[in-house]
Amino acid sequence: MTSLTFTLAPEAEEEPREAGRLLFAGPVTFVKGVVAMAGLPPADRVEVCFAGRSNVGKSSLINALTGRKTLARASNTPGRTQEINYFALGESRYLVDLPGYGYAEAPVAVVAKWQALLKQYLAGRQTLRRAFVLIDSRHGIKAVDAEILKLLDRSAVTFQVVLTKVDKINRAEREAVIEQVKGALAKHPAAYPEIVVTSSEKGEGIETLRAIIATLE
């Protein structure tokens, strides 16, 4: 079996970068929070979702992408978002914010409900083009992340790792976590072979991620 070679996503070229800028500079609206599959909006456009363990910086990244500081609520209480939150990027895309996982203080029954909804969504959404799995660059891929990656493999959903908070680590730590992530991803057939490195605070990788989302078909 040939294993994929994982690389860092290159900076976007001019055309996709401009497509990304235009997409995220246009209307971005909160559509609804969904607690059951029956509540999903019509599957009438390309959809991308963001998954990550609680406190990975998911809300901050979504806010940085959209240039709107309070679109996705960044909470001091990780795990507070218990719904699948839908945002419309104009008329052409849905950006979907999945509930944070791995929050130890959430009640067992709540966690089980999240997991069941997550599995149903990932396995049953035909318009889902890519899942972006956020990994905290200070910690790399942990056991709780590996579980979601296995779920994505089983659901045959292409996923791409996005490293967050790279401004919080030094160059050597960055290189080490990138190598750790590359090694972990080699076991996952659904993994997209480019890793996006981001900092919501400094803006690193934001244009690249916008371009990727804008050019998915």
Image (tube, grey):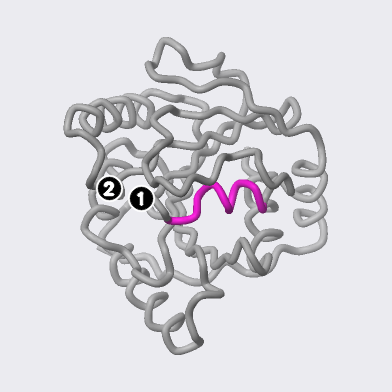
Secondary structure of the residue carrying numbered label 2: loop
Tell me the residue that label 1 is attached to.
53
Magenta span contains residue 99: no
In percent of width and height, residue 91 lies at: 74, 25
Q: Position of residue 109 (x, y in %)?
A: 18, 27
Q: Which residue is mark 2?
A: 102
State yes or no: discs 1 and 2 in contact (Cβ < 8 Å): yes
- 201 sits to left or right of 183: right
Residue type at mark 2?
Answer: Gly
| Residue 146 percent coordinates (x, y) | 25, 54
Q: Residue at x 66, y 32 (%)?
A: 93
Residue farthest front in this picture = 76
Q: Earlier in the sequence, mark 1 or mark 2?
A: 1
Q: Residue at x 38, y 76 (%)?
A: 177
Quadrant of res 86: top right
Q: Quadrant of the N terminus?
A: bottom left
145 sits to left or right of 172: left
How far apart are the two marked residues, 1 and 2, measured between alpha carbons? 5 Å
The answer to which quarter of the image holds residue 157 is top left
Q: Is residue 217 above or below residue 110?
A: below
Q: Residue at x 65, y 38 (%)?
A: 71
SS type, badge 1: loop
Query: Percent position (x, y) of residue 82?
Result: 39, 30
Residue 57 lies within the magenta run = yes
Q: Which is nearer the eye, 215 or 165?
A: 165
Q: Which of 39/192 is in front? A: 39
Which residue ends up furthest to the top in the rendered image? 38
Crowding around mark 2 (Cα neighbors within 10 Å: few <14, some 14 to 19, many 20+) is some
Q: Is residue 50 visible?
A: yes
Which region is colored magenta?
56-64
Assign the C terminus to one quadrant of the image: top right
